[in-house]
Image: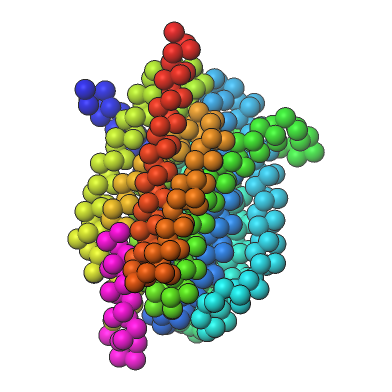
Amino acid sequence: MFRQYTKEFKYNIRLSVPVILGMLGHTFVAFADNIMVGQLGTAELAAVSLGNSFVFIAMSLGIGFSTAITPLVAEADGAGNKADGKNALKHGLVLCTVLGFSLFGIILLLKPIMYLMKQPPEVVELAMPYLDLVAFSLVPLIIFQAFKQFSEGLSQTRYPMYATIIANVVNIVLNYLLIFGSFGFPKLGIVGAAVGTLTSRVIMVIYIWILLKGKKKFHEYVTGFNFKRIEKKVMRKIISLGFPSALQMFFEVAIFTAAIWLSGVLGKNAQAANQIALNLSSMTFMFGMGLGVAAMIRVGNQKGTRNFSELRRIAQSIFFLTLLVEIVFAILFLWGRHWFPTIYLDVDHAQNMADNTEVIYLAGQLLLVAAFFQISDGIQVVVLGALRGLQDVKIPTFITFVAYWVIGFPISYYLGLHTDLGSTGIWIGLLTGLSASAIMLYIRFNYLTKKLITEQL
């Protein structure tokens, strides 16, 4: 029985590993920033957390929107239609560029909200200049996403990974030089981390375009664009898929962002602990995201060939693989929950000893809850990828809203601010929301695929 699923593991892993490594690259930028900034103190770490909370919300909209390009390109590739694939990329690039600048402008307008959020004053003052530069880095990041989603739609998942690895190397080097003022460079503190992030994302876009342009398979796709000829029909198609996908990602990222803000109300140490647990959870989440992209590509291809029985079997093989991977992560979090937080802090710093001890204890409590939501978090994002491959986005958007904001957030708010559970209560709400999302999305996938198979008979 399991053989029909496990025989797909090798191809699914080959397809998803470059995506996972590329996704981890984005998270590793934050990981490197957090570790280096954490050496400066818990206030600086909390400031990066607060600044990034605004950027992550905007980034979720940009990345979520760009995912509309992948199923369109995958379907065109499955049907052998190059013109439609190039059209999806061209119109996707236009929309992603406009969206990137729009999100940057919105963040600048919303910056004063930080003063009204009951966050520690020293954290807000540090976060302000950091946010300006990291917000602008959204423009190249979302343009990069358009190229990335296009490349993945053609089942070529390695090239975006290469771009992300190079960006990471640039970011870490610049962080080291500019945060601490090494080798005669100016000591900019957390602003140095922002300069590193912006520069690395610009390089990422330039690199992936040059790389794709130089490959014979991609050359005619990524050159000779006629941007004067924009088709309303294609724009509407991308928007109709992209906008709900953006909202799906927004609803999930926003509840984790709300956890950052709720933790900030509890104090800078609770916020720093939340940032550590969130950063670690984000890295394991990228494995689910990568497998979700594999599900989206393979389901999109099968939709192009209209083989719905095979579509269902392939998708379920990816769900099964995800379950096994996430169980491993759950065990890892349980095992290392007291040690992982020490990586982020200078535990030998005498002046910060009391703060660091509290942060390590609180982060350990949060990682205990995070161990349990590894499974539901991984399953929900992979099923969501399969539904995007089917180009079913409206009902899943409603499901994610209900799961995170009708079920999860009220529990986070009540347990976090009105019981002795504090930060742990906030994360219990996250666990509940993710579990509700995983269950409801799977029911939706099960219903749709059975219906498609029945209609074909």
Q: Quadrant of the C terminus?
A: top left
Q: Is residue 422 left or right of residue 53?
A: left
- The spot of residue 440 in percent (x, y) is 42, 37
Magenta residues: mostly which secondary structure? helix
Q: Quadrant of the N terminus?
A: top left
- What residue appears at the point 47 percent right and 18 percent down from the top-left corner? 452
Towards the viewer: 377 or 417: 417
Q: Residue furthest bottom?
A: 351
Q: Against 139, is 7 above or below?
A: above
Q: Residue furthest top?
A: 457
Towards the viewer: 229 or 290: 290
What is the magenta range? 348-369
By what rule are the colours in the image chosen?
A: rainbow
- What residue appears at the point 31 percent right and 79 percent down from the top-left corner? 358
Q: Against 373, is 323 above or below?
A: above
Asked if residue 359 lies in the magenta stretch, the reply is: yes
Q: Can I make out residue 134 in this image?
A: yes
- The spot of residue 433 in percent (x, y) is 41, 50
- What residue appears at the point 32 percent right and 51 percent down from the top-left corner? 374
Q: Can I make out residue 276 in this image?
A: no
- What residue appears at the point 78 percent right and 34 percent down from the top-left corner? 229
- The spot of residue 329 in percent (x, y) is 27, 52
